[in-house]
Image (spheres, grey):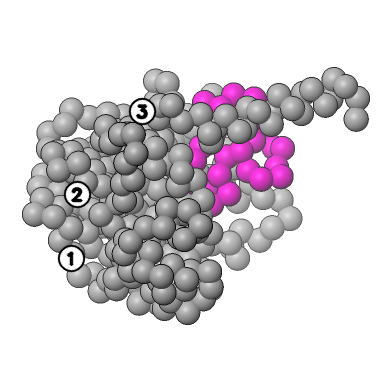
Amino acid sequence: MRRRDFLNTLVGSFAALNVLFSLDKPRIFPNSSKKEPSETDILVKVLGTAQDGGLPHFGCYCKNCLRARENPRFARLISSLAILELEERKFWLLDATPDIRAQWDIVHHRLAQEKSGSQNSPYAILLTHAHIGHYTGLMFFGYEAMNARQVPVYCSARMGGFLANNGPWSQLVNLENIAPRILSPDKELSLSPRLSITPLPVPHRDEYSDTLGFVISGRKKKLLYIPDIQNWEAWSRSIVREVEKVNIALLDGTFFSPEELPGRDLSQIGHPFIQSSLKTLSEVASKGKSEIYFTHLNHTNLALDPQGAARKKIEERGFRLAEEGMEFSL
């Protein structure tokens, strides 16, 4: 390798590391974050918006990944939300991603819990399913890391069985680092007097567990979160009606269009295309009563180019991409 190539590679590597480990303040994209006036003390904060592999993606040097390596403001952490109760300074994590360390610090910075010598755990973790971007961050609660005590992990019965019966996750259960709590489908669960969640079963690739979406309800507003689903037509519910029931919807936007992964059968991967969602939800978006955002974006997604035609098409239709740092008051 020539000296110039080596130096370029080294600079790119440091830029990528800076994305994950420069944690003196939360990473928020300039001019793109949505922070609503705090009408209540219940907030949903977006901690990440990328598909399970993140952005830049491991081993990929596509245009989107190169841009994210060269300029960390275009990088994205893996899809996750935090539910914050500001007055009580409590928080719940929705999915435990491989990026949980960076996301943890974003939450603690927001709640001003960065005290010397302190070790704070979430009140609970809510899991959608057993794909790597959604639960593998649980490892940091284990004996080798935080060594947490009985952190409640709300999940489906099948997901709970997967954690209890498969290592290394079973060690977390046996050592009582985490305590699985089984959710009943479609049954509302109160997390606090001002906050509740309702798990919604959705179709997806269910190799190790089934898959859940969530409705998060505060006193004034509701938010629908479905980062993964096979497609809207495969669901027994109408996505149009489900979005109309809420004020904010963060939906699976993994791929913009079918040509993004040449050589791979996207029907086997299973996600609705943003192109299709724009058509399906066009009438809802035009009414303006429900805000619709796309999340869980694959590193190939055409909409990741802020100046590209795909992004413009989304915004012209009244939709938006979710961005890390956005906050929604419930």
Tell me the quarter of the picture where residue 147 sits.
Answer: bottom left
Q: Quadrant of the N terminus?
A: top right
Q: Nearer the viewer, mark 2 or mark 1?
A: 1
Tell me the quarter of the picture where residue 74 sits.
Answer: top right
Compared with 290, 24 (above or below) is above
Contact between marks 1 and 3 (CB within 8 A): the answer is: no
Marked residue nearer the N-terminal end (3 or 2) = 3
Q: Nearer the viewer, residue 1 or 21?
A: 21
Local crowd size for mark 2, using a 10 Å CA cut-off: few (<14), some (14–19), many (≥20): many
Q: What's the residue at 59%, 24% (across, down)?
A: 71
Q: Nearer the viewer, residue 99 or 43?
A: 99
Q: Which residue is mark 1?
A: 188
Residue 307 left/right relative to 213: right
Q: Which residue is mark 2?
A: 222
Which mark is drawn over residue 33? 3
- Magenta-span inclusion, residue 138: no
Q: What's the residue at 43%, 26% (across, down)?
A: 24
Local crowd size for mark 3, using a 10 Å CA cut-off: few (<14), some (14–19), many (≥20): some
Contact between marks 3 and 2 (CB within 8 A): the answer is: no
Q: CA distance from mark 3 to mark 2?
A: 20 Å
Q: Position of residue 133 (x, y in %)?
A: 51, 55
The residue stretch that appears in magenta? 51-79
Q: Position of residue 177 (x, y in %)?
A: 38, 64
Q: Quadrant of the C terminus?
A: top left
Q: Position of residue 190 (x, y in %)?
A: 15, 61
The answer to whether any part of residue 268 appears in the image is yes
